[in-house]
Structures are given as C-alpha cells and as structure tokens.
C-alpha cells in the first residue's frame, strides 16, 4: 500500500505541461531567487559530471539541494549533436525532484523544456542587472531554440527598440524573424560585425565551435551574454573579448571547470582565475558591483546549474499541485 501511494504521488511533468505551466515572468523570478541563494551559500550543488560518448555526444549529471530542509534532486541529460541541423545540439533528459521530509521522489520533469526556458530566464535576470539602462538594440547570434526563448524572455526585463537576428545560415535567421515580426521589432542582421557595432546587448546562443563574436567588434558599454557553449571545447567568443570584459558567471566553480571561452583565455596566459570577478548572485545581493560605469563591457557566462533546474522543477510541482 505504501509503495502504491508513493507511485501515485510521483508526478510526471512532460514537455507540453512544462511549456504550459512555466511562464517566463514566474521563471525569471525563480531564477533570480535561485542565483541569489546559490551565492549566499543557502543551496548546495556538486560540480557537473560529464561522460563524453563520442563526437558531439555527452551525458551529464547535475545534482543540487535548495536548502538543508528544501527540495533536492538531479538533472540527467544527454547533449547530442543534431544531424538534421549541423552545428546544433539537442538536450534531452529528466529532472528528478525529491521532498526533504522523508526523501521521497515527488516529480520527474522533462529536462529539455525546462532547460530552454530557465536558461533564457536566467539570461534575462543577468541582462536586467548588467545592461545599461539606456540600452536599446539587442543582437541575438544564433537561430536555434535558445534564440526563440531569449526573444520571449529578454523583452520582459528591458525595452528594446530594435532586435537583430544573425545566424550563420541567413535563411534560418530570416525564419526566426518571420516567426516573431508580429510581436517584436525584429530584423535580420546580414553581417555579424556590422550588427555587433550597433548592439547594446548581445546574446550568443549558437552551437558554434569557433568564435562568432570578436572582442575588437564590441563597443564600450555593451553587455554580452555567452550562452551557447556549456562545456569545454566550443567557443562562441574570442580571447580578446574575455580579456576586455568584466566577467561574471552564473557559478564561479562551474566556470573555472567548464566555461570554454574563459578556459581558452586562461590557457593562453591572458587571464587568471581572478578575472571572474563575481557570480551573478553576488551582484544581485549587492556584494560585488556589476556594471561600474557606462563604458564597462560586462559579460555574463551562462553554463546553467542544478540549483536553477531544481528551482524550476519545484515551481512546476507547486503549480501542478495547485491545479
């Protein structure tokens, strides 16, 4: 009977339900709270572990607890190159959520859907904290799923007068614009360098293996979100940008192990570990200044971490239980 009740209480939340229940305003608020809690030491998480399974194929595990008496769990996810979309990768897996009273599993959640939404929500939090108040032009470099989630999230935290979409495949950039042109002031950017010269906020959300964003292109005062590369290897921006920027990570410990652009710059002797000036949670808590003046190039490195995933899963479970 007890086992039957546990099975009955275990909630399965598929991708369709995630997209229906995990709205961006609520997820943005949850990600801000999660990143504050991480930097305040209220949460616990282990470094991400990864098994490389051949070219373009990785299996990863991310575990965390929201507090000693809070929900805990793990994300198990595969990151495989998509043969139908060269340069693009798909994240597939599950988040398992446990309750803290007796340690029962209470939810299994589609990790792909959560990862797409919470990544863009976290970028929105960082952009609100680090971009100039007068930033008006947003550039998104990449045309996959994260381009769409960032288009949904970022306008919720900042008013952009123009949004440029650049992709290595112009046809894919045009397709993104076509999908969003009735809702946002979006346009195709034919040339990356020219688009960067106009941008106040830049998000790289590509599957690029080599830099698509060069430091010499970026104007003083720009805020950059590096999102697409989440493991050592692929780099979206060059060492010149890393060196020039005020570098802020979602998790400093994770960045020291897995932030590809930073690792390349460090290996070249251009920066050291101290170049990571803060976690975004420390900025949100007022412990470390983010943007110091209008000429700072601020850089937020998004790797994603388990505290974000567990916080998103907890929010979903609460909404399922509320009916």
Image (cartoon, helix red, strand yellow):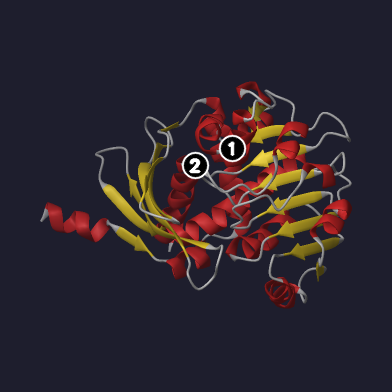
* Image marks 1 and 2: residues in contact by CB distance under 8 Å: yes
Q: Quadrant of the N terminus?
A: bottom left
Question: In the image, what residue occupies the spot 44% across and 51% down?
Answer: 313
Element assignment for label 2: loop
Q: Position of residue 19 (x, y in %)?
A: 51, 66
Front residue (pair 277, 80) = 80
| Residue 171 image point, x, y percent | 70, 76
Instruction: For label 2, count other residues whose C-alpha is less than 10 Å away and answer few (under 14), some (14-19) or many (20+).
Output: many
Q: Is 187 situated left or right of 30 in this image?
A: right
The kind of secondary structure element at disc 1 is loop
Whether residue 37 sits left or right of residue 9 in the image: it is: right
113 vs 307: above or below: below
Of residues 49 and 306, the one nearer the viewer is: 49
Q: Which mark is residue 96?
A: none
Identify the residue position indicated by label 1 in the image. 250
Residue 178, quarter of picture: bottom right
Which residue is at a point 69% across and 65% down the rendered structure image? 168
Q: Residue at x 53, y 46 (%)?
A: 230
In the rendered image, the quadrant that contains the C terminus is bottom left
Residue receiving disc 2: 305
Tell which circle, 1 or 2, labels the residue nearer the N-terminal end.
1
Quarter of the image for residue 92 reads bottom left
Query: At 51% across and 63% down in the image, what residue appears?
Result: 21
């Amino acid at each position: 009977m007890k086992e039957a009740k546990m099975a009955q209480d275990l909630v399965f939340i598929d991708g369709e339900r995630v997209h229906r229940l995990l709205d961006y305003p609520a997820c943005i608020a949850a990600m801000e709270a999660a990143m504050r809690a991480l930097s305040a030491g209220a949460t616990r998480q282990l470094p991400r572990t990864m098994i490389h399974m051949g070219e373009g194929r990785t299996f990863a595990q991310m575990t965390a607890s929201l507090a000693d008496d809070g929900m805990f769990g793990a994300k198990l996810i595969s990151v495989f190159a998509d043969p139908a979309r060269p340069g693009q990768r798909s994240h597939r897996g599950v988040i398992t959520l446990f309750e803290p009273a007796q340690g029962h599993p209470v939810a299994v959640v589609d990790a792909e859907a959560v990862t797409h939404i919470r990544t863009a929500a976290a970028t929105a939090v960082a952009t609100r904290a680090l971009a100039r108040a007068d930033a008006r032009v947003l550039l998104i470099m990449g045309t996959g799923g994260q381009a769409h989630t960032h288009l949904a999230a970022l306008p919720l935290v900042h008013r952009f007068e123009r949004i440029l979409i650049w992709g290595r495949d112009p046809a894919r950039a045009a397709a993104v614009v076509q999908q969003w042109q009735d809702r946002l002031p979006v346009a195709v950017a034919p040339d990356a360098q020219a688009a960067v010269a106009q941008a106040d906020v830049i998000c790289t959300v590509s599957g690029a293996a080599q830099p698509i964003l060069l430091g010499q292109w970026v104007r003083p005062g720009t805020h950059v979100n590096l999102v697409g590369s989440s493991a050592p290897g692929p780099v979206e921006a060059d060492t010149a940008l890393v060196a020039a920027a005020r570098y802020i990570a979602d998790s400093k410990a994770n960045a020291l192990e897995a932030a590809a652009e930073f690792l390349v710059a460090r290996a070249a002797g251009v920066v050291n570990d101290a170049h990571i000036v803060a976690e975004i949670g420390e900025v949100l808590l007022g412990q470390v200044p983010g943007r110091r003046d209008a000429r700072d190039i601020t850089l937020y490195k998004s790797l994603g971490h388990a505290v974000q995933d567990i916080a998103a899963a907890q929010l979903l479970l609460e909404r399922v239980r509320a009916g």
